[in-house]
Amino acid sequence: MTNHSSRWSLASVFALFAAAALPQPAHAAPPAAAEAAAPATVRNGDADVNGTRIHYQLHGDLASGKTPLLVLHGAFMFADAMKPLIDPLAATRPVIAIDARGHGRSGGVDGKLSYDLMADDAAAVLAKLGVKQADVLGYSMGASTAIALAIRHPGQVGKQVILSGTSRLDGWYPEVPAGIAQITPETFAGSPIETGYKSLSPTPDKFPKLVENIKTLDATPFAYSDEQLRAIPGKTMVIIGDADGVTLDHAIALFKLRGGGDIAAATQGFMTEAPKARLAILPATSHIGIMSEVPAIVATVVPFLDDAKPPMPTF
């Protein structure tokens, strides 16, 4: 990799994290959802999990009778950073958002991170809240955690929304982990990432340790097998940008492994029932930019979570 491409990768990774943590512009909120319902009541809590404290937010009422949605954020983020996406989704169902191990208000920064461990943390939070089964939406690091959760705790997971995430390390363009390998704590000096960590974390002086943990996580090969992915019982929606850090080939392969690519539906030209898997590739959208596409994401995710039958044309 040339010096020029190295600088480009590093800048892109930093921009990804910083942009994802910034508040969403007001125009990005779907007007219909914003006007249809008042903001859901939010309750904060903590669960003692695997030797540490995991913080969660509960938006709405678990007694509503609607399947709750678990939201898992990306690396260096925290539950609050997902608020632009949580708010419109919480207008339609209860939402549980977690600060991942070592992130936000959660503890555990001194230990190593893995997708399996973060998946077990999420399962324990659901158990503490008395949630027998939840749908799950994960972004980036949270998307890989969502896959691990569905594999390790299939009975606790219904539908999964995999937003700009992978089931294996080589699902990313190689320049992405290469860029992450170059970051240092100084990369984030004065950024919303650093200030957010220091303002929320129970160990505000350990931001360098979080950076080390993320670099180690993204340098450690992982791969859930085709058999494990096919065995996940719930339905899956895969969403990426057409200029994402996740390769198009990987997203399509994951879509097919989860039951997408139905030849019968393709040859008859219409669908008579909700499919097992859905794929959305957002145009002119990067891994950074996808977090600014809240209206498009909500417009595709809500019908999926509701198991809506695809509409027939009216011509």
Image: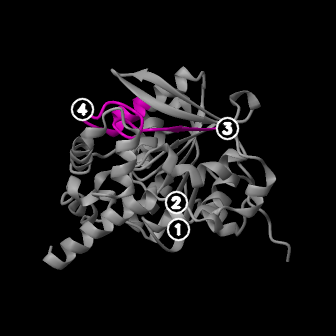
Q: Which quadrant is home to the N terminus?
A: bottom left
Instruction: Assess whether mark 1 and mark 2 are in contact (beta carbons under 8 angstroms).
Output: yes
Q: Mark 2 points at which residue?
A: 239
Give neighbour class at mark 4: few <14, some 14-19, many 20+ (Cα, 10 Å).
few
Name the residue rendered at 52%, 50% in the picture.
82
Lower position in the chain sequence, tag 2 or tag 1: 2
Give the residues drawn in magenta, as a range: 94-121
Name the residue rendered at 64%, 50% in the picture.
87
Seen in the picture, residue 214 relative to 130 is either above or below; the reply is below
Tell me how far mark 2 sits from mark 4, CA to CA.
32 Å
Task: Give the image location of residue 57, x and y in percent.
Answer: 56, 35
Seen in the picture, residue 274 relative to 71 is either above or below; the reply is below
Q: Name the residue under label 4.
A: 110
Q: Which amino acid does label 1 sit on?
A: Ile
* Label 3 residue SS: loop
The image quarter in which residue 112 lies: top left
